[in-house]
Image (cartoon, helix red, strand yellow):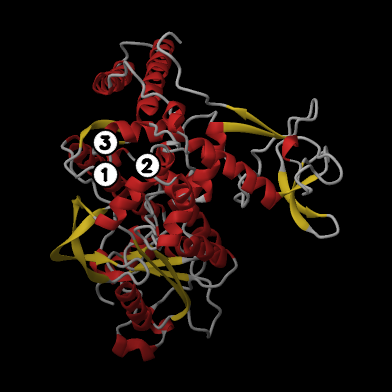
Amino acid sequence: MRVVRPQLRRVLGEDDPLPLPDQAEQGGEQRGLPELSDKTPLIRQTCAMKTTKTPFGQRTRAVIYVRISQDRTGAHLGVDRQREDCEALAARNGWDVVEIYVDNDISAYSGKKRPDYRRMLQNLSEGTATVVIAWHNDRLHRSPTELEEYIDISERHGVSTHTVQAGHLDLSTPSGRMTARIHGAVARHESEHKAERVARARQQKAIAGEWGGGIRPFGWGVPTGKTKKVLVKETGEEAEVPVLDMNKLVPEEAAALAHGHEMLLSGQSLKGWIRWLADKGFVTARGNPIGMVEGRDMLLRPRNAGIAVYKGEEVGPGLWTPVVPVEQHRAVVALLNDPTRKTTPGATPKWFGSLIYECPHPGCGNTLRVTKGGRAKLPGYRCGDNHGGARRADRLDEYIEDVIIERLSRRDAVDLLQPTPEGIDVSALQKESEEIRRRLTDLAALFGSGQIDMAQFTQGSDTARAQLEGVNQQLAKAATKDPLVPLVGVPDVRAAWNRLVLEQRRQVLRTLMRVRVHKSRPGRMPDGGYFDYESIEILWRRVSAPSANG
């Protein structure tokens, strides 16, 4: 009490306004203590401050906020340790903790939504508590916008902030708010500076062809026998995990990636590869099922061909073992990015000719679907506009398959193969592709330095990208595999046909012929059956290889 007396004497204008502890019983009147009111300077200043609004006789209600992210003070502590330290602070001050809010692995600087932080602000606005406890003030916010919102709520609802490491954060005074803003600006600077260092380090690694970190890419990551400590997102605690060599292939996954390239280049669909992966039990590096988006991204990765990338741009060769040659990768990318490529959204066709056989009715243009109808409720091919009735699906598919097998069993079946593209220099195309990509990078640098304007940059980029698309199309043509290859020149065409999956058979059908299903004649046919083979019109797409003269 003696320490504060000089300040009180200066403010109140008294020699010794407060009694010593052993003089407290003597009474204020004997000491000449003036009557205090809101006119007194110190009391007026105290009344102007918004204090914690806890009803008289009740314990102070407090909430705890803890957060773990990859950019943090006290990262090694984990969520549990942060919570324990905050609870100890509450116990020392006699506060009742009514709620604990936890945001795990979400950076306050990243801008990502923090669910529990938003819930805490809402609850504070509703009067849930009057004290917020955090391990450090940068656990609460590193964004100036968030800080201002927090200050506003604290002022309006009389919320006091206390931290384990930085002590009391007094937001009720201008100096306290200034201190909080300075701390926030410093924390923001640290985060931005670290982000720049991390980005630069990743760029250098990419240019050097090294693994840049992140989630293990499907296809790579062989254990080295060593371990390292990582933070477990679910618990916020450290755990030991094996160190992986990201330059070495995981044999089973690499084979699956190579198979996916082969399937697409032989005319099969992405959906077929996804089903194949599911049947074989493959999952993502995180253990999740591989869907269409994940599968497509896997096949589009330049890493598959040993190409290093930084921010979506190829920067050179990688040090890891590639899964496929560069020309195969370029071909698959061209196929998947082709806007004219046909896809079959929805359910996968279960019948050989579904959505391939054609309705010949003038002006129709529909393909046939299999539905059940008639008294027997048998599956049959029908036009969506009910042209020509229905044809038994099993009989029609069997007939078309027999025709294909018979045609590919002939000696001249080799003439049906698509000729290997001549005059395509894959090596030269690869060099041209790399040169175009360098031009795109140079254009961006020129625009960034102000040597060219936006119009020049746009025109140059559009021209270069159009040239690159043409190169990729040529590479795709050179790498695409004719779907007839597995069936031509084999000893037993029917056995080879039976080994193909339905999607491969459908691709052979699309490649080899068009099938137009006309209305069947009534009654028995000359062969004694009821199936009218003569109403099935086959238009061959391939008759023989084109001659040298075209």
Mark toward the start of the polypeptide (2 vs 1): 2
Q: Residues within 10 Å of mark 1 (few under 14, many from 20)?
A: many
Mark toward the start of the polypeptide (3 vs 2): 2
The x and y percentages for residue 361 are: 80, 30
In this rendering, is residue 335 above or below 60?
above
Q: How many marks?
A: 3
Indicate the secondary structure of the residue bearing disc 2. Answer: helix
The residue at 53%/85% (across/down) is: 57
Distance between the Cα atoms at labels 3 and 2? 10 Å
Q: Residues within 10 Å of mark 2 (few under 14, many from 20)?
A: many
**Quadrant of the rendered structure where residue 424 is?**
top left
**Quadrant of the rendered structure where residue 171 is?**
bottom left
Residue annotated with mark 3: 325
Q: Are marks 3 and 1 in contact (CB under 8 Å)?
A: no
The x and y percentages for residue 234 are: 37, 69
Indicate the secondary structure of the residue bearing disc 1. Answer: loop
341 lies left or right of 489: right
Distance between the Cα atoms at labels 3 and 1? 7 Å
Q: Quadrant of the N terminus?
A: bottom left
The amino acid type, in three-letter code, at marker 3 is Pro
396 lies left or right of 503: right
Q: Are marks 2 and 1 in contact (CB under 8 Å)?
A: yes
The x and y percentages for residue 362 are: 80, 26
Residue 183 visible in the shown view: no
Between 171 and 462, the one lying in front of the other is: 462
Furthest-top residue in view?
549
Residue annotated with mark 1: 323
In this rendering, is residue 272 above or below 94?
above
488 lies left or right of 366: left
Residue 383 visible in the shown view: yes
Residue annotated with mark 2: 261
Between 154 and 471, the one lying in front of the other is: 471
